[in-house]
Image: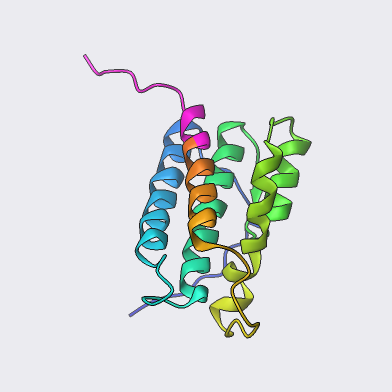
Amino acid sequence: MWWVVPCAKAWSFMNGPSEAAHLLRMSRKDLQAMRALSDPNVADVEAFGFHAQQAVEKALKAWLDLRGQLYPRIHDLDELLRLLRQHGAPVPVEFDSLAILTDFGVAFRYEAYEDAGEPFDRGEMAGAVEHLVQHVQSLLPPVMPEH
């Protein structure tokens, strides 16, 4: 039997590098799914966009976590980018284009994308998402070998 308990926390804070690394591992899983869905003959844009959005969302939350910042339980990529900048993170402007994915984490999970054509080139989007994940990965402190 499953029990659903509403969460009282509207903001999340994990616990530094190990939790940020966990978020990035989860982000890379979405990145892998996104790559598998990159062929329009294999998957609809909603499926590709959902996993792209999730990879970006988790990477941005990992970045906020690395900076010791609380992050809201939201899917709004514009807001997550704004929070990073508000807290002094040097966010490259090129990452702003990823905000187009926000609706794929919310509306297009339950609705069809009805516009003619796709809102982005899947290859370019995949490259941009991968670049963000790699950027955040580079911010993680090096893993110290255990003795």
Given the current orientation, which residue lies at the most extreme right position?
Answer: 86
Q: Which residues are magenta?
A: 135-147
Question: At 42% from the left edge and 34% from the top edge, which residue is drawn?
Answer: 18
Is 29 displayed left or right of 122 in the figure? left
**Residue 16: in magenta span:** no
Q: Which percent across, then down, holds residue 101?
A: 61, 62
Q: Which percent across, then down, holds residue 104?
A: 58, 70
Q: Which percent across, then down, holds residue 99?
A: 67, 56
Question: At 69% from the left edge and 30% from the top edge, which residue is drawn?
Answer: 90
Applied colour scheme? rainbow
Given the current orientation, which residue lies at the most extreme top position?
Answer: 147
Above or below 113: residue 16: above
Foreground residue among 68 and 9? 68
Above or below 2: residue 67: above
Above or below 102: residue 132: above
Q: How would you classify the magenta stretch by its main secondary structure?
A: loop
Is 9 displayed left or right of 37 in the figure? right
Above or below 130: residue 3: below
Q: Quadrant of the C terminus?
A: top left
Foreground residue among 140 and 97? 97
Q: Which percent across, then down, holds residue 142?
A: 40, 21
